[in-house]
Amino acid sequence: MVSIYLASPLGFAESTRHFMAQLVEQLDAHVTVVNPWDDIRFVDEFERIAGLDSRAEAFAALAEINTELGRANAESIRNADGMVAILDGVDVDSGTASEIGYAFGLGKRI
């Protein structure tokens, strides 16, 4: 089955997660959806970081997480057959725009 990477900012807010779930459900009938918001490896680490007194330590830990998530997302985009990108809102989300540019550079259908 064809796989698509779902690029969107919909996981940031509780108010849009329901729409994301509905979208994934509808897409799943036609393609395999790779949704980066399903990666919950760092939930416990985010809670630990929130309790840190040292901003430097918190920023360093967040930088490590950002690097790993970026690497994982790039790999998922490379492995997907194409991409569906959500571009609603006042401005296009910067992360979604980056994912689109990366996929385009790889010759993926968007």
Image (cartoon, helix red, strand yellow):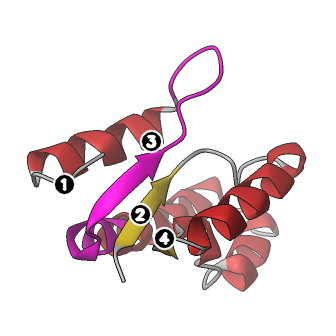
Disc 2 to disc 3, C-alpha distance: 11 Å
The spot of residue 21 in percent (x, y) is 76, 63
Mark 3 surroundings within 10 Å by alpha-carbon count, few (fewer than 14), some (14 through 19), many (20 or more): some
Disc 1 to disc 4, C-alpha distance: 26 Å
Queried whether the magenta region covers residue 43, the answer comes back as no
Q: Is residue 37 left or right of residue 51?
A: left
Q: Residue lying furthest top in this view? A: 90
Name the front one of labels 3 and 4: 3
- Residue underneath mark 2: 5
Tell me which numbered mark, 3 or 4, is placed earlier along the sequence: 4
**Where, by quadrant of the figure, is residue 57 drawn?**
bottom right
Tell me which numbered mark, 2 or 1, is placed earlier along the sequence: 2
Mark 1 surroundings within 10 Å by alpha-carbon count, few (fewer than 14), some (14 through 19), many (20 or more): some
Q: Is residue 64 above or below residue 97?
A: below
Q: Which quadrant is the C terminus positioned in?
A: top left
Name the front one of labels 4 and 2: 2
- Residue underneath mark 4: 65
Residue type, mark 3 in image: Thr
Tag on residue 96?
Answer: 3
User: Does the residue at mark 3 contact the one at mark 4 (Cβ under 8 Å)?
Assistant: no
Residue type, mark 4 in image: Ile
Disc 3 to disc 1, C-alpha distance: 15 Å
User: Does the residue at mark 2 contact the one at mark 1 (Cβ under 8 Å)?
Assistant: yes
Q: Which residues are magenta?
A: 73-92
Residue type, mark 2 in image: Tyr
The spot of residue 26 in percent (x, y) is 67, 63
**Where, by quadrant of the figure, is residue 101 drawn?**
top left
- Near-viewer residue (41 or 79): 79
Tell me which numbered mark, 4 or 2, is placed earlier along the sequence: 2
- Residue underneath mark 1: 108
Q: Is residue 107 above or below residue 100?
A: below
